[in-house]
Image (tube, rainbow, N blue to C red):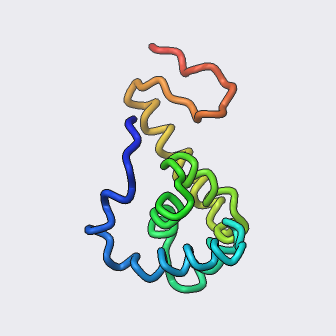
Amino acid sequence: MRDYDPNDFLPQLPHLEQPIADARRLLAEGATLEAVLRHLRAAGCDMIDSKWVAMIVFGMKRHEADRALYLSDAWADLRPAIDQIDAVMLELARQQGAEVRLVDDPVAPTPRH
């Protein structure tokens, strides 16, 4: 999957102008990524919008932002649901004959039948 510059999507994300400005301000004041994510969530940003803000403000790639949000304390309460969704998606892909595994999963790919 090819990475892209998330700033190219800013015209399509006008609702993120204020969250991006807030995140930039907090970062300039020395806030950590975790503190910015907590602020965004408290301000009403969902996980997807927070991902966009992290990519734009912190210069993260998609997979880096995904992992940062997943591991953050700000979004920790959603981890079990995310894990469940991932498990279901992997199982559905396997049922369709795909060889799949998580990026850091040391388990060998599913054998083909």
How far across and down, in percent of the image, does residue 77 sit? 67, 69
Q: How many marks?
A: 0
User: Is residue 41 placed above or below 97 in the rendered structure?
Assistant: below
Query: In the current view of this chain or complex, which residue is farthest to the front?
Result: 28
Query: In the current view of this chain or complex, which residue is farthest to the bottom?
Result: 43
Name which residue lies at 66% across and 24% down: 107
Name which residue lies at 51% across and 84% down: 44
How far across and down, in percent of the image, does residue 74 sit? 67, 71
How far across and down, in percent of the image, does residue 51 sit? 50, 62
Query: In the current view of this chain or complex, which residue is farthest to the left?
Result: 12
User: Is residue 72 placed above or below 109 in the rendered structure?
Assistant: below
**Of residues 87 and 64, which is closer to you in this image?**
64
Q: Is 98 placed left or right of 44 in the picture?
A: left
Q: Quadrant of the N terminus?
A: top left
How far across and down, in percent of the image, does residue 48 sit? 46, 65
Name which residue lies at 47% across and 23% down: 99
User: Is residue 5 placed above or below 101 in the rendered structure?
Assistant: below
